[in-house]
Image: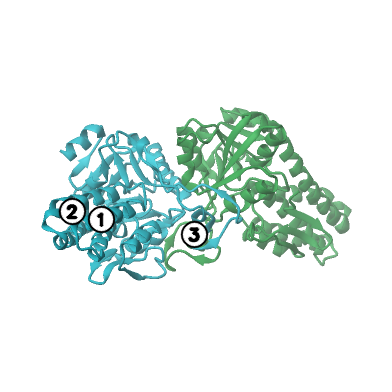
Chain colours: A cyan, B green
Amino acid sequence: MIHTIEWKDSGVVMLDQRLLPRQEVYRTYSRYQEVAEAIRTMVIRGAPAIGVAAAMGIALGVKNSPVDSIEDLDAAFAIICDTLAGTRPTAVNLFWAIERMKSVYARTREKGVDAIRQALITESLAMHRQDIESNMEMGRLGQELIPANARILTHCNAGALATAGYGTALGVIRAAVNAGKQVQVFADETRPFLQGSRLTAWELNKDGIPVTIITDNMAGHFMKKGEIDCVIVGADRIAANGDVANKIGTYSVAVLAKENRIPFWVAAPVSTIDPKIPDGSFIKIEERDPDEVRKIQGIPITQDEAVVENPAFDVTPHRYVSAIITDRGIARPPFTESIRALLL
Amino acid sequence: MIHTIEWKDSGVVMLDQRLLPRQEVYRTYSRYQEVAEAIRTMVIRGAPAIGVAAAMGIALGVKNSPVDSIEDLDAAFAIICDTLAGTRPTAVNLFWAIERMKSVYARTREKGVDAIRQALITESLAMHRQDIESNMEMGRLGQELIPANARILTHCNAGALATAGYGTALGVIRAAVNAGKQVQVFADETRPFLQGSRLTAWELNKDGIPVTIITDNMAGHFMKKGEIDCVIVGADRIAANGDVANKIGTYSVAVLAKENRIPFWVAAPVSTIDPKIPDGSFIKIEERDPDEVRKIQGIPITQDEAVVENPAFDVTPHRYVSAIITDRGIARPPFTESIRALLL
């Protein structure tokens, strides 16, 4: 069992994903601002995990807020929520989690400050538990798609480390293994942050699931050689028409899969669907620190003044997506209809 | 002027490309075995540069061979040629250069040991000079394809550092700049060896040509956003039908270019064409040390025991190639005919 994030009396405890796989360090954050900073600096990452972290950060901030009156708590709560909302722009689960905490706050407000504090903690714990349950359900539904002997390519990390536990894309793979299927995973290393070579390989190794790391630019080569049977990735935001924002490079993998007639599946809870946006052009793509490209694990690989770009996500148009595996069922093209049906 | 490789009285001098762009170190090799090792360990790389290095390595080995009789030199020459031929399997220029040295040896043999020694040195210097001339000619012909305002994607390094000087793909870009065109280059970083972020960015910076480094998995994203007008890459071996072996990831770039209706050009001298092989399936793909993927600049990024793959090249089928720019003209589809015409 991987403890990506936990609520403890001392604070919110996270496995520091920046140090994996070489070091396994757990950090305890006792202030909500530290939780926000941990999200921003990618101590924790992955859309569902970010959602849970934001919820726990809000619960922590309200718990520790030194106010007595409901009016003062209203003001403090707004600041706490804004701070967590300002951490990362692309994953919709962050905003979904904050909205859910705001609803609980509104529903509990008349009961007073202490009741709010308790209700927000309870809600964040429920979101943690429900995220794992939703992963398990996605796994149960999604593993039906996996062939009995499957060589599966994945990009980035959509595993236990990207969620409260178990994983979305890797949850489907785990469920396939548990169903007795023979699985071989190819993990794109996923520059610049190396979520594939550092995180996906680490957590699959822990579970004894065979995994081979390749650099991002090798995926097409192995597809063309016939060594990949299917692709499964996670998502950070899914538009109403099925366009998928996910880690930079996902679009390239999807195009290569289509060109090689390999199914391309996305696994994500319905909380990742943003029905308010009609298509992917409305998704804000986070631009991150150029030094993530200029350096690898702190080691400079370019000239100091090198000009770089560092978009953290891209959008895969729905025409490249074979199916979207959610915790409420599998959506297939045409996605506008199938996604709407899932959300009813 | 970049001095990738030079012949000096003290030996063969190479710019150590493993240390760029952070250090500019020149190494002098006085034994042919050292030249072979420099090719194997990628002190020097790039198909045309490897060809010149092999020729100079042979000239060096014969120059220093402590034999007096022609029969002893025959035996020594065979060992020297075999050593250099065993360094890297994919780039055909290596074998082309060795064959050329063998021809000179055969033609000069009756004149005796000293005449052979001199002839081989002269030949390797001629190959160095002719490589630069061929790059200039490719540039002159190829730059006609470049739009007046061009955002050009390139992969790996097909520049002065991959040749005796000037470059193949980057030679075309240099010629376009010299013709007064506005050029913005996007350089794929090109994991695992980072030829793009380390070498291409370094040499374009030296020439004042604007270059932006992106990770390999970003290329598709920028193509889809309409920010790339054309792609130009080098080649390590071109089959008779136009299939192109080049640095791993080239195939993916070509598929993404086709999907986004962006022209994909290959620049290579005719010495990179291997008319003996009908298609790319006959090209041996070098597998390199897994530690190139497990580490970056010597720093481990994965678990020590991580399973990785490390093919150094891939094959781009000719149907993705818009044109092949050579020093004898530009070949266009159907390539079987146009390549044959170039070689007449």
Identified at 37% across, 35% down, the residue is A281
Chain letter for the residue marked with disc 1 in the picture: A
Residue on which the image places disc 2: A105
* Same chain for the residues under marks 3 and 1 in the image: no
Kindly state the secondary structure of the residue where label 3 is placed: helix
Estimate the x, y position of residue B117 in percent, counting from the top left.
84, 57
**Quarter of the rendering containing residue B270:** top right
Chain letter for the residue marked with disc 2 in the picture: A
Kindly state the secondary structure of the residue where label 2 is placed: helix
Q: Are marks 2 and 1 in contact (CB under 8 Å)?
A: yes
Residue on which the image places disc 3: B293
Chain letter for the residue marked with disc 3 in the picture: B
Specify whether B198 is left or right of A252.
right
Mark 2 or mark 1, which has the lower sequence index? 1
Residue on which the image places disc 1: A77
Q: Amino acid at mark 2?
A: Tyr
Measure the C-alpha gap from mark 3 to mark 1. 46 Å
